[in-house]
Image (cartoon, coloured by chain):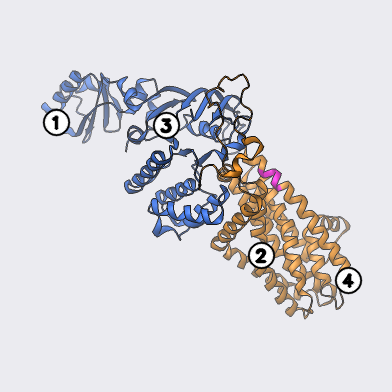
């Protein structure tokens, strides 16, 4: 076991309203969380914005003290000894302010030195990781001058310098193009294969979660509502498929059968999403492609369930599902 | 590098099995034997790394501000030339304007930097690295203080030429810049890290710089008693005094050293406070 969390509770106190800032009620950002991460796995935390993913991660990295519960990482009690986290894990946070005005190379080298490497080792690891992530051409440029995805990749480079048995990555691929994403997952895989590194990954991207995670915990309002392999979770909703309809303009409610579909659909602009049994889905597709409704149809898809459907089936807020990214 | 450097297992809290339950039961959810901890970064190498990174940051982003600080000080001296005509007053104008450059960068800009770092969550980066808090604070303070050196020297030389003051003892800047720089940078870092909001950190930095300007540049003899107490309480004053005394043909070095000693003492106190504030801000 690399990381074990028991009964974790964290409540942010209510904030008094100030001029221009409305008052906020107390928020229970972690509400009795239990988790176990096994050695060598890529473990994901999936949930929409505000589900409590980053709060959980900040408690796992010793940055935030929980109100109650325990966090053990590699056998160390991080609630009692939060300062040990820095010597056990590498952390990629969401903010890059500390590195923004440094060049990519200096950011990686400095981080390595502050992780306890001597100058020679820090420079060797800097060069290796810059090469590995394909950042060679950008090495001499300040992070501030890079695009969002490039900057994220540079921050990841800094997080990877100086080996650690556990990597905690908070939305590492935000804003990255596919080439950069592939470089990230290749780097993660290599560390796992060669050194048995464990990865704890925060994401709100369901496609990414399905393709890279070994196991995933689904978070909703500070609680883990499910925890299994992506395939295991999807088996929960295996008897359903998802139909998406996109209309050219106004939906043709007068066409036969369309009004009935409207009842079952979750509409978001011109897009309708329906979850139904496969035979119903076939009938629905026949309805919209066969009759006069077809003229009004822009696009349709029929798909097997994704983790987003799992999230909804488990009782996730429907508005919360909008926070899950599918691209 | 190995994940387990030799020194990692020599630390007291890193002994395998240290703190493990004696009953033989596995600890809750953890491995029976805690994994060895990676080495901490040692103070001096970490300080050097932070210093180098901060100086490069300053070079990239702060050079225009150093120009502003220098032009501001030179402009003030040109203005004051119409008011004072040599003597003791001219010395304090030149010394005050020179130390003002230090206050602008070390106090004002460093308070803003730490305020911004704290507000944005940038401190997390340092807090998740095994680096001594003193290395982060001292490295940043030292970088900002040394970044003021060219502007301060230029201001002192231009001022001496403008008011026909002797430049023979300007070498004293070698002590004035680091000591008043350390005192003001420590103050700036502490303000930036303690201010509850980023805007307040900026405000404190600006006010501190304005105080250094008004109380340092204007001749002390004309001030009301209350204001002169405030002047005595401001650490930059002692840097100004030390520099002003060095314009004498035969300076009283004992008094100069006493002034610089005050700067050094304030530096120790304010940097200690800033380190404490950093520790407090890093773990919330």
Task: Give me the chain letter of mark 4.
Answer: B
Reading the image, the residue beneath label 3 is A43
Secondary structure state at the residue bearing disc 1: helix
Question: Looking at the image, is mark 2 or mark 1 nearer the viewer?
Answer: 2
Question: Looking at the image, is mark 1 or mark 4 nearer the viewer?
Answer: 4
Between the residue at mark 4 and the residue at mark 2, the CA separation in whole angstroms equals 26 Å
Reading the image, the residue beneath label 1 is A294
Relative image position of residue B37 (x, y in whole percent):
57, 38
Residue occupying the point 50% across, 48% down? B1
Between the residue at mark 1 and the residue at mark 3, the CA separation in whole angstroms equals 43 Å
Q: Is residue B202 visible?
A: no
The crowding category of the residue bearing disc 1, from other C-alpha atoms within 10 Å (few below 14, some 14 to 19, many at least 20), is: some
Reading the image, the residue beneath label 4 is B252
Question: Looking at the image, is mark 3 or mark 2 nearer the viewer?
Answer: 3
Which stretch is magenta? B274-278
**Image quadrant of residue B54?**
bottom right
Between the residue at mark 1 and the residue at mark 4, the CA separation in whole angstroms equals 97 Å
Q: Are marks 4 and 2 in contact (CB under 8 Å)?
A: no
Reading the image, the residue beneath label 2 is B148
């Amino acid at each position: 076991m690399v990381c074990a969390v028991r009964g974790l509770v964290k409540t942010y106190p209510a904030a008094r309203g100030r001029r221009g800032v409305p008052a906020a009620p107390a928020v229970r950002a972690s509400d009795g969380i239990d988790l176990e991460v096994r050695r060598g796995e890529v473990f994901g935390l999936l949930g929409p914005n505000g589900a409590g993913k980053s709060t959980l991660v900040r408690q796992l990295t010793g940055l935030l003290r929980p109100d109650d519960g325990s966090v053990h990482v590699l056998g160390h009690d991080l609630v009692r000894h939060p300062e040990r986290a820095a010597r056990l894990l590498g952390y990629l946070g969401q903010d890059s302010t500390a590195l923004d005005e440094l060049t990519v190379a200096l950011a990686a080298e400095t981080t390595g030195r502050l992780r306890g490497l001597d100058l020679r080792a820090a420079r060797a690891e800097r060069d290796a990781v810059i090469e590995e992530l394909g950042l060679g051409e950008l090495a001499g440029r300040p992070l501030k001058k890079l695009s969002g995805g490039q900057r994220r990749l540079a921050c990841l480079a800094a997080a990877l310098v100086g080996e650690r048995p556990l990597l905690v990555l908070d939305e590492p691929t935000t804003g990255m193009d596919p080439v950069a994403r592939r470089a990230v997952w290749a780097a993660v895989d290599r560390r796992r294969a060669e050194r048995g590194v464990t990865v704890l990954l925060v994401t709100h991207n369901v496609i990414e979660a399905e393709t890279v995670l070994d196991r995933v915990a689904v978070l909703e309002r500070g609680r883990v509502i499910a925890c299994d392999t992506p395939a295991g979770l999807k088996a929960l909703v295996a008897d359903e498929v998802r139909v998406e309809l996109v209309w050219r303009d106004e939906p043709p409610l007068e066409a036969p059968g369309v009004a009935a579909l409207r009842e079952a659909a979750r509409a978001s602009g011109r897009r309708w999403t329906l979850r139904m049994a496969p035979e119903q889905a076939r009938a629905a597709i026949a309805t919209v492609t066969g009759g006069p409704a077809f003229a009004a149809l822009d696009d349709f898809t029929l798909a097997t369930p994704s983790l987003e459907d799992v999230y909804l089936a488990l009782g996730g807020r429907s508005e919360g599902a909008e926070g899950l990214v599918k691209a | 590098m190995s994940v387990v450097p030799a020194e990692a297992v020599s630390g007291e809290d890193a002994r395998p099995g240290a703190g493990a339950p004696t009953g033989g039961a596995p600890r809750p959810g953890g491995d029976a034997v805690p994994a060895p901890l990676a080495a901490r970064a040692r103070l001096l190498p970490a300080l050097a790394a932070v210093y180098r990174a901060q100086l490069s940051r300053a070079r990239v982003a702060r050079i225009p501000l150093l120009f502003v600080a220098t032009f501001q000080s030179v402009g003030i001296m040109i203005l004051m030339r119409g008011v004072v005509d040599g003597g003791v007053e001219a010395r304090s104008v030149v010394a005050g304007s020179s130390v003002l450059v230090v206050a602008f960068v070390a106090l004002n800009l460093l308070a803003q930097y730490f305020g911004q770092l704290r507000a944005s969550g940038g401190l997390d980066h340092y807090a998740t690295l095994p680096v001594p808090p003193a290395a982060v604070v001292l490295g940043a303070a030292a970088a900002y203080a040394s970044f003021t050196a060219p502007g301060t020297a230029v201001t002192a030389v231009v001022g001496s030429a403008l008011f026909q003051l002797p430049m023979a003892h300007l070498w004293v800047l070698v002590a004035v810049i680091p000591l008043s720089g350390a005192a003001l940078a420590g103050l700036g870092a502490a303000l930036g890290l303690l201010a509850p909001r980023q805007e307040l950190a900026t405000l404190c930095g600006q006010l501190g710089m304005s105080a250094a300007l008004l109380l340092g540049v204007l001749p002390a003899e004309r001030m009301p008693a209350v204001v002169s107490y405030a002047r005595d309480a401001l650490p930059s004053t002692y840097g100004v005094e030390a520099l002003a005394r060095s314009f004498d043909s035969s300076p009283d070095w004992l008094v100069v050293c006493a002034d610089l000693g005050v700067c050094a003492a304030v530096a120790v106190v304010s940097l200690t406070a800033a380190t404490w504030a950093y520790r407090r801000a890093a773990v919330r």
